[in-house]
Amino acid sequence: MQGDGVDRIPILKLGEALLVTIQVDMHDQLAQALEEDLTTAIVKHGARGVLIDISALEVVDSFIGRMLDTIAAVSRMLDADTVVVGMRPAVAITLVELGLSLNGVKTALNVDRGMALIQPHTWRSDDDEDGD
Amino acid sequence: MTERIEIRTSQDVLRVRQRVRALAIEAGLSLVDQTKVVTAASELARNTLEYGGGGSADIELINGAHHGVRLTFADEGPGIKDIDAALRDGFSTSDGLGLGLGGAKRLSNEFKIDSVPGKGTRVTIARWK
């Protein structure tokens, strides 16, 4: 998108949340660019949550794992929740064995469930568990 | 037959992942085992790049008692003084080596490391069916 020769991962606005779908095997600069772009976008849009869809990722190594942790920590400071959605089973098994259990990151099986975690107040929901 | 991949940039780390994936499929590894060995390769390739100042990966099929892949990462960087410490999780406070070596070891069936301070490091792993 920008003329610096670095590709960017698109960030979509979805209600009060931002949706990032990672569809390419990210090299390190791309991952760093995503961290910066997301942080800027959270503030710009006043987003309450960030959904990161990694269902297309065949490998999550410690670098990408740390990136997800960092995004979650920075988002938290900016009053936004981060939910990582769509992790493949083989990736989950490998991450735990690697020693990265992503304790600081919320996860959900798919985008719908992730959205429900982020926006319990505004996301359409059949059950009315919230009193306010 | 061994294929050598030079590791000079983070794009090369991606290339290592792609080639190791292709070889793991050729070896008939399960999806979980493919994912484990590709992830281990990614950790080791990044160590080669970040700590070794670049180097190479030699990747090959193994077809003896076991069927799988064997990968050797070599650099001529500063080497590792205390390998036992480097294998412990969280060894490095800087990015990378914290989980890289220990994690790669846990994800492999075979793990060998030779490192000489001032000369470089060579790590060999294998994953089989």
Image (cartoon, coloured by chain):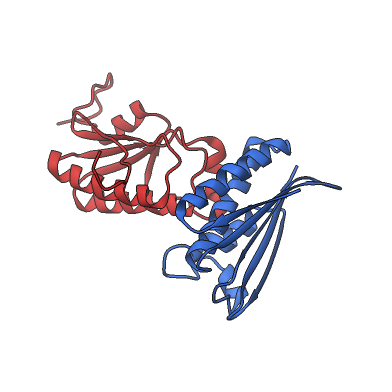
Q: Colour of chain A?
A: red
Residue A30 vs B103, above or below: the answer is: above
Residue drawn at the location 40% of the way across and 52% of the way down: A28
Provide residue B129's location: percent of width, then percent of height.
75, 42
Provide residue B11's location: percent of width, then percent of height.
47, 50
Provide residue B96's location: percent of width, then percent of height.
47, 62
Q: Is residue A76 left or right of residue A89?
A: left
**Letter of the blue chain:** B
Q: Quadrant of the N terminus of chain A?
A: top left
Q: Quadrant of the C terminus of chain A?
A: top left
- In the orientation shown, which residue stands out farthest toward the right? B65
Residue B11 vs A57, above or below: the answer is: below
Provide residue B113's location: percent of width, then percent of height.
67, 68
Q: From this viewpoint, is residue A104 visible?
A: no
Residue drawn at the location 51% of the way across and 51% of the way down: B12
Residue drawn at the location 39% of the way across and 39% of the way down: A107
Q: Is residue A1 left or right of residue A86?
A: left
- In the orientation shown, which residue stands out farthest toward the top? A126
Residue drawn at the location 24% of the way across and 44% of the way down: A3
Image quadrant where residue B67 sits? top right
Give the total of numbered labels: 0
Residue nearest the observer in this picture, B88 or A9 = A9
Q: From this viewpoint, is residue B122 visible?
A: yes
